[in-house]
């Protein structure tokens, strides 16, 4: 356990040093990183979350890619009950992940998923990162909030139709 705590402190320490030392102008912001506005996250962090969602949930068959569902617009509703410290930590992680190119990000997410079957000191933080990021992305995707066209696209792709009728 102390090794994991040391690793997390090291990563967060490097993130804070990088945030203070590296001018933002050296990193190109992606055009149209995200159309959603957020109270909690800046456009760069939302863009990272959008790219993570597209890596975890790419388009396939009738299912849309994460970025095409418009689910990211509902991130504030999901984060409202979260503790401020958790939001702060997530913002730091998303800022770090926003600096990675998409292939490196995809590699990291694959390593996080593979860590579930491993038992070394680095596996614990990787599993936690995997569970946290997947939880956010999957919750937004399968909540079936209105997509960009105003219709819930995920439930339509699953052919899921909920009908409630009274028994009396």
Image (cartoon, grey):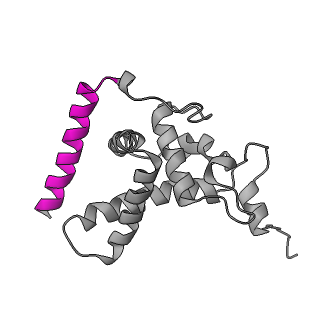
Residue at image coords 18%, 60%: 4
Q: Residue at x 68, y 48 (%)?
A: 68
Residue 2 at x, y percent in the picture: 11, 60
Kindly identify the residue that appears in the image at 21 percent across and 51 percent down.
8
Q: Furthest-left residue in view?
A: 2
Quadrant in which residue 109 is drawn:
bottom left
Tell me: 160 left or right of 101. Answer: right
Q: Is residue 150 above or below residue 7?
A: above
Does the magenta stretch mainly form a helix, a strand or a loop?
Answer: helix
Residue at (74% x, 68% y) in the render: 158
Does 144 sit left or right of 57 as displayed?
right
Image position, residue 44 (x, y; %): 47, 34
Magenta-colored span? 2-23
Q: Nearer the viewer, residue 91 or 49?
A: 49
Q: Position of residue 31 (x, y in %)?
A: 57, 30
Q: Quadrant of the N terminus?
A: bottom left
**Is any part of residue 83 visible from this angle?**
yes
Q: Is residue 13 magenta?
A: yes
- Say whether residue 141 is left or right of residue 25: right
The percent position of residue 5, horizontal first and vertical second, equals: 16, 56
The total of numbered circles placed on residues is 0
In-front residue for pair 38/119: 119
């Amino acid at each position: 356990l102390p090794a994991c705590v040391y690793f997390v402190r090291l990563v967060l320490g490097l993130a804070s040093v990088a945030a203070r030392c590296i001018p933002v102008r050296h990193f190109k912001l992606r055009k149209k990183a995200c159309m959603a506005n957020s109270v909690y996250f800046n456009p760069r962090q939302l863009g990272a979350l959008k790219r993570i969602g597209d890596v975890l949930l790419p388009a396939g068959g009738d299912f849309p890619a994460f970025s095409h569902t418009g689910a990211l617009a509902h991130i504030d509703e999901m984060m409202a009950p979260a503790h401020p410290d958790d939001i702060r930590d997530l913002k730091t992680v998303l800022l770090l992940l926003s600096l990675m190119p998409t292939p490196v990000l995809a590699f990291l997410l694959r390593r996080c998923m593979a860590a579930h079957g491993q038992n070394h000191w680095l596996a614990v933080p990787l599993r936690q990162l995997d569970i946290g990021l997947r939880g956010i992305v999957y919750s937004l995707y399968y909540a079936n909030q209105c997509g960009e066209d105003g219709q819930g696209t995920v439930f339509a792709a699953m052919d899921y139709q909920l009908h409630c009728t009274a028994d009396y």
